Amino acid sequence: MKNRIIAIKANITTLEVDAIVNAANQSLLGGGGVDGAIHEAAGPDLLDECEKLNGCDIGDAKITAAYDLPAKYVIHTVGPMWDGGDFGEGFLLESCYKNALDLMLQYKCKTIAFPSISTGMYCYPIEDAATIAFATVIERLKDTPEIEQVIFCCFSDYDLDVYNEIMSCNEFLTL
């Protein structure tokens, strides 16, 4: 499993994978950060399709075409806003990853790229979020050989360092 999970610093809108994950807001109509960048790069057809989806609940995920992006699909998921950790944020964040992976498999995708969901404007601590992301993905990869690669696409050098540290501390899980 070692090369099935990697962390990179990149612009997620440039990745040639089957699906990229959008850290969306509940409206799915675009916003700031990753969400805004994906909508801008995909072009206006993405917004048109998202308008028909009637939003998305926190922890859930919905899929659209990727339009002008090099990916085939965009999986939109709404992460929780950090409120100290005692309000189910961890469960909801885990659900984002699980539901995105479910859609990936349903649409027969083999490669997927995740941003660091909820760690931007939603203020989820990167260390906690990355730990949840990694653990959720590792658990799914154990019984899903059809997933060829999961990319954690980081925005900053610091985020990349956090993901790499978590992955190296748990290296036995990726062998």
Image (cartoon, helix red, strand yellow):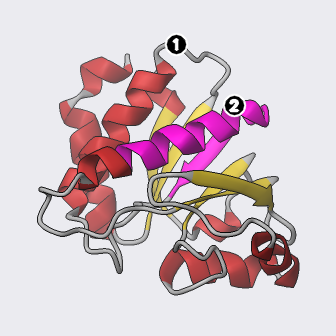
Residue type, mark 1 in image? Asp
From the image, tell me which residue sits under label 1.
Answer: 143
**Is residue 63 found left or right of 6 in the rendered image?**
right
Q: Is residue 103 magenta?
A: yes
Q: Quadrant of residue 9?
A: bottom left
Residue 55 drawn above or below residue 32? above
Q: Which mark is residue 30?
A: none
Residue 28 drawn above or below residue 160? below
Q: What residue is drawn where x is 53% and y is 51%?
A: 60
Element marked by disc 1: loop
**Residue 13 appears in view:** yes
Residue nearer the viewer, 22 or 52: 52
Q: Residue furthest front?
A: 54
Q: What residue is drawn where x is 51% and y is 86%?
A: 32
The image position of residue 45, as x and y in percent, is 88, 77
The image position of residue 150, as x and y in percent, is 54, 39
Q: What residue is drawn where x is 54% and y is 72%?
A: 26
Q: Quadrant of residue 20?
A: bottom right
Which quadrant would the C terminus be assigned to in this image? top left
Residue nearer the viewer, 162 or 117: 117
Distance, label 2 to label 1, CA atoms, is: 12 Å
**Residue 164 appears in view:** no
The image position of residue 59, as x and y in percent, is 45, 53
Residue 35 drawn above or below residue 130? below
Main SS type for the magenta part? helix
Q: Which mark is residue 105?
A: 2
Q: Is residue 118 magenta?
A: no
The part of the chain drawn in magenta is 93-114
Residue 95 drawn above or below residue 49? above
**Dot 2: few (<14), some (14–19), or many (≥20) neighbours within 10 Å?**
some
**Is residue 93 found left or right of 161 in the rendered image?**
right
